[in-house]
């Protein structure tokens, strides 16, 4: 919880030190090893060998950190002081094993669980979307089964792909099988794009999840979406996962599986802001593939600002 006294960690004063100076940590927050006195721990998960299309998300944490240097402490859209209210530190990158998805998921869980047990919330920068399975294991070990709020072009509940059970299209099915998620308290939104067959359309709801397609989502105003989420998730521990491919590739070309007809950056921020007051134990922003990003890094810039909105949500639970 935010403390009434000054938080221990935060970025340096940008009026005294240029934002482009120094080692590139998230939002220029200090790089520390211990989560003590940390409200939100930012961690990179540079893993992408569970992708089924374009690789490069292993460079996502680096790209998001680089773009995040432009973030300032105050969020005027939410009238919220973020840095200066929250103690936010960058705890570096989680150790992963390139080429071994199942082992990497275990490594993520083992490294995150002690952080979660301190009471710190985690904000992870991916990495392909399989990394969320390790995050959910860590949070469920502490809090029990979680409700999930997902913004994504894909529901990621497929089963086996070319003989593999652990890939970025299957994390929420695996999480459900492991008892990490409560599907009755979960809402997946933004789904669109081609599928393997008609049975894929109903797959998430067959598993117990509520789904809002992208076409349905953009027909809702922000507050209507927020109300749908609150009605669904009720009370209990929550996790928020944001896949950058929920944005249209016109706004976020740097991702592994782009799908046309997605959200604008403005719309995505609006839907996130509508979640104010909900208390999440953890957050992530995944699937930023820096090699496919455009001039000016619009995908990384969008991801950094999404992460800032997630920190803002954390402030607003106070």
Image (tube, rainbow, N blue to C red):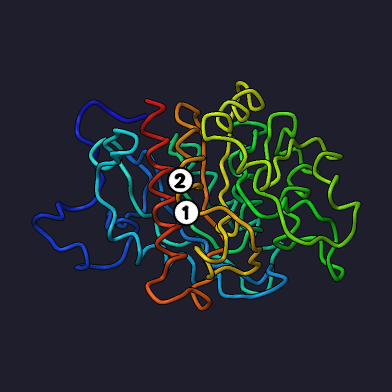
Whether 249 is drawn above or below 40: the answer is below
Residue 201: image tag: none
On the image, the x and y values in percent for residue 46 come to 52, 67
Left or right of 44? Residue 210 is right
Question: Extreme front residue here?
Answer: 219
Question: Extreme left residue here?
Answer: 16
Q: Quadrant of the C terminus?
A: top left
Badge 2 element = helix
On the image, the x and y values in percent for residue 162 come to 85, 71
Q: Quadrant of the N terminus?
A: top left
Whether 241 is drawn above or below 143: the answer is below
- The image quadrant that residue 301 belongs to is bottom left
Q: Nearer the viewer, residue 224 or 169?
A: 224
On the image, the x and y values in percent for residue 77 come to 33, 38
Q: Nearer the viewer, residue 117 or 186?
A: 186
Whether 53 is drawn above or below 246: the answer is below
Left or right of 81? Residue 34 is right
Identify the residue shown where x is 12% and y is 60%.
17
Q: Which residue is mark 2?
A: 269
Asked if the residues shown at circle 2 and circle 1 are in contact, with their CB atoms under 8 angstroms apart, the answer is yes
Residue 265: image tag: 1
On the image, the x and y values in percent for residue 22 come to 21, 67
Identify the residue shown where x is 65% and y is 31%.
144
Identify the residue shown where x is 25% and y is 50%.
72
Whether 254 is drawn above or below 150: the answer is below
Badge 1 element = helix
């Amino acid at each position: 919880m935010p403390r009434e006294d000054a938080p221990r960690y935060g970025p340096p004063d940008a009026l005294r030190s240029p934002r482009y100076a120094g080692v590139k940590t998230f939002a220029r927050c200090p790089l520390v090893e211990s989560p003590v006195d940390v409200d939100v721990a930012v961690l990179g998960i540079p893993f992408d060998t569970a992708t089924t299309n374009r690789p490069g998300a292993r460079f996502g944490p680096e790209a998001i950190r680089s773009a995040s240097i432009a973030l300032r402490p105050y969020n005027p859209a939410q009238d919220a002081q973020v840095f200066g209210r929250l103690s936010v530190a960058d705890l570096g990158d989680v150790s992963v094993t390139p080429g071994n998805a199942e082992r990497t998921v275990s490594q993520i869980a083992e490294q995150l669980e002690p952080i979660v047990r301190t009471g710190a919330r985690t904000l992870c920068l991916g990495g392909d979307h399989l990394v969320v399975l390790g995050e959910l294991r860590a949070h469920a070990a502490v809090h029990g089964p979680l409700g999930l709020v997902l913004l994504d072009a894909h529901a990621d509940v497929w089963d086996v792909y070319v003989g593999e059970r652990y890939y970025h299209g299957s994390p929420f099915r695996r999480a459900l099988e492991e008892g990490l998620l409560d599907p009755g308290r979960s809402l997946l939104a933004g789904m669109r794009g081609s599928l393997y067959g008609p049975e894929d359309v109903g797959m998430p709801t067959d598993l117990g999840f509520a789904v809002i397609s992208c076409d349905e989502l953009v027909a809702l105003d922000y507050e209507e979406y927020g109300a749908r989420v609150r009605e669904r998730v009720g009370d209990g521990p929550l996790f928020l996962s944001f896949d950058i491919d929920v944005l249209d590739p016109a706004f976020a070309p740097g991702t592994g599986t782009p799908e046309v007809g997605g959200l604008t950056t403005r719309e995505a921020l609006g839907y996130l802001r509508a979640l104010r007051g909900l208390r999440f134990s953890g957050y992530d922003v995944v699937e930023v593939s820096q090699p496919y990003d455009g001039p000016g890094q619009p995908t990384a810039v969008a991801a950094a600002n999404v992460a800032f909105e997630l920190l803002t949500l954390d402030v607003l639970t106070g």
